[in-house]
Image: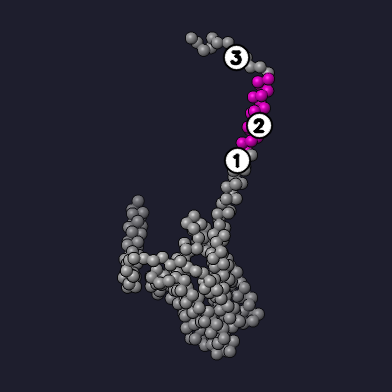
Amino acid sequence: MDPDSFPPRKISPEKQELGVLFHRVTSTEQPQQRHSAKARNERQSFASAWGPLREPVFRALWIAAVASNVGTWMEDVGEAWLMTSLSTSTLMVALVETAGSLPVVLLAVPSGTFADLVDRRRLLLITQAWMLIVAATLGLLTVAGVTTPWLLLIVAFALGLGAAVNAPAWEAITPELVGRKDLPAAVTLGAVAFNVARAVGPALGGLLVAAFGSGPVFLLNAASFLGVIFVLYRWRRPVAKSNLPPEQVLGAMSYRSRGRRIALLWRHCLDCAALNL
């Protein structure tokens, strides 16, 4: 039977009004629901970004790290300015930054190995105390006016040694401070702390060096390590027991070196394949 042969269905005016009213209600509710869902997702995203700060130890360490990183950047400004006043050689001024960065290049693999083999909390306490003593010594020598160009380079290298050994252990404790779901946000907050200090530290260091000289700036940097040491000292890190025999340092370094060479080989192969496309 032809469907067109059926007579059109009549709809009463009351049903038509109900249909129009229902359409208006649903059409106004959908944008409101989308807006509320978007606002809820934004609040959840904002809460998750700052979620790691709900952990007391992570929050205390994060605040202490910001202060310590600001002091480190202030130290860099003070060292460069002090060298310009001690020597007119451009080579000596350039060697200040080299002395501070060279230990990172030399100790990249060994420091990562130590961070995996020893108690990280104890290692961090040692490195933080080492940098405090070195920075305080440089501050006292500078205030006394007995700092020489070569002594400044030696102290800068000693500070770099502490920073090079400290960095892998510092990054490795992050999963122990926050849950798995907060780990990406915790890593991001660590980068935020570093970049905030990099933006504020040199400017503040320049103002303080101009006002008081390099010596007090070095002493302030030494004091900035106290917060990190205090938090680490009060942190009761749970130690996981393992039935495996302890790994040897040289064996672990060799394993990491092989892994790095394999990664470099794969990167070289991928680069060659990309060039041949």
Residue type at the position of mark 3:
Arg
Residue type at the position of mark 1:
Arg
Give the Cα separation between the discs numbered 3 and 2.
25 Å
Q: From this view, report whether residue 38 is shown above or below residue 219.
A: above
Horizontal and vertical percent position of residue 27 = 63, 33
Q: Are marks 1 and 3 in contact (CB under 8 Å)?
A: no
Q: Do the residues labelled 3 and 2 touch (CB within 8 Å)?
A: no
Q: Are marks 2 and 1 in contact (CB under 8 Å)?
A: no
Secondary structure found at label 2:
helix
Residue type at the position of mark 2:
Val
Label 3 neighbour load within 10 Å: few <14, some 14-19, many 20+: few
Label 1 neighbour load within 10 Å: few <14, some 14-19, many 20+: few
Residue at numbered disc 1? 34
Q: Is residue 197 magenta-colored?
A: no
Horizontal and vertical percent position of residue 163 = 47, 74
**Magenta span dominant secondary structure:** helix
Q: Return the residue nearer the eye: 87 or 129.
A: 129
Label 2 neighbour load within 10 Å: few <14, some 14-19, many 20+: few
Give the Cα separation between the discs numbered 1 and 3.
36 Å
Earlier residue among tags 2 and 1: 2
**Do we see residue 234 in this rendering?**
yes
Relative side of 186 to 112, left or right: right
Secondary structure found at label 1:
helix
Residue at numbered disc 2? 25
Residue at numbered disc 3? 9
Earlier residue among tags 3 and 2: 3
> Residue at position x 68%, y 18% from top?
13
> Residue at position x 47%, y 63% from top?
176
> Residue at position x 51%, y 12% from top?
3
> Residue at position x 55%, y 90% from top?
146
Give, as a single range, the part of the protein colored magenta: 14-31
